[in-house]
Image (tube, helix red, strand yellow):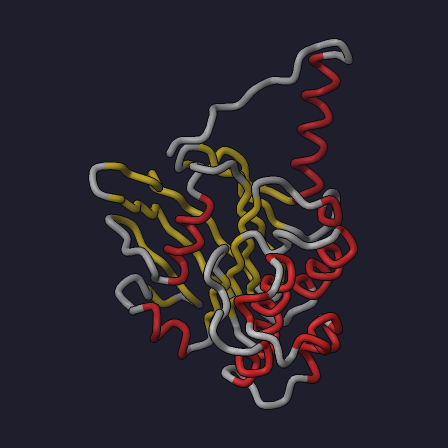
Amino acid sequence: MTISLRHARVRYGPLEALHGVTLAAPGPGLTVLLGRNGSGRTTALRALAGTVPLSGGAVVWDGADVSRMPAYERARRGLCLVPERQAVFASLTVRENLDLTAREHEVALEAYPQLGPLLGRRAGTLSGGEQRMLALARALLARARVVLVDEPAQGMSPAVAARTYELLAGLDACVVVAEQRLPPGLQGRPGVLVYELRRGAVVFSGEAAELERRREAGRTRRGPGAAPRRGPGPRG
């Protein structure tokens, strides 16, 4: 089970956001798309989901080219996207949000027991971290084959964030997350695949442990008194 981009290009009007990106997310397993704002990590996630069209290249899912398959059909076939914003139905209660995915909520409430007392609350009144828990709880209930999440732990406490990554890593699915920084719980963790993007191109691919070794080697070469090296700033 694998979903991948092959030489993918995405344009927003005159601007090209992805410049021939190739990456593959095998499953079951966790793949992290790493990069600052403007790096292309969110666009890559949306390209996999089909919510933005490719101007070149392909999306391949289990050996089949699905580049022209609409997003709703990818969802029907088992792909779940949790965007960074507007990931829940704000006017519905927590219970109603969960009901849209499954009538039985045990899996969701075991994952995030904090949602139990909030079942009658409208989702739009929840804090940012609570809304992320609800969105991810719905993804867990969906039992999807591919789970794509933009900044899963945004607004969560460190303990809940760590729990979230344990849950995602344990899914029987291709799990792809987009993050600005590698979460502490994944640093050095074996089997976690990382693609670092910068200005719409992949600048590193490998396991999380390898990325950490490279960064540590770079810090050692620069010396303890050296100023930190600055990468290119965000665009747009």
Q: Position of residue 135 (x, y in %)?
A: 56, 68
Residue at image coords 45%, 30% = 234
Q: Is residue 142 visible?
A: no
Identity of the residue furthest to the top in this view: 225
Residue at image coords 75%, 9% = 225
Q: Position of residue 52 (x, y in %)?
A: 31, 56
Task: Tell whether 22 sits left or right of 12.
Answer: right
Q: Position of residue 207 (x, y in %)?
A: 64, 44
117 shown above or below 199: below
Task: Tell whether 225 sits left or right of 38.
Answer: right
Q: Is residue 207 visible?
A: yes
Q: Position of residue 95 (x, y in %)?
A: 59, 82
Residue at image coords 33%, 66% = 66
220 shown above or below 155: above
Q: Quadrant of the C terminus?
A: top left
Task: Tell whether 188 sits left or right of 198.
Answer: right
Residue at image coords 49%, 64% = 87
Tell me where residue 109 sits by quadrant.
bottom right
62 shown above or below 47: below
Identity of the residue furthest to the bottom in this view: 103
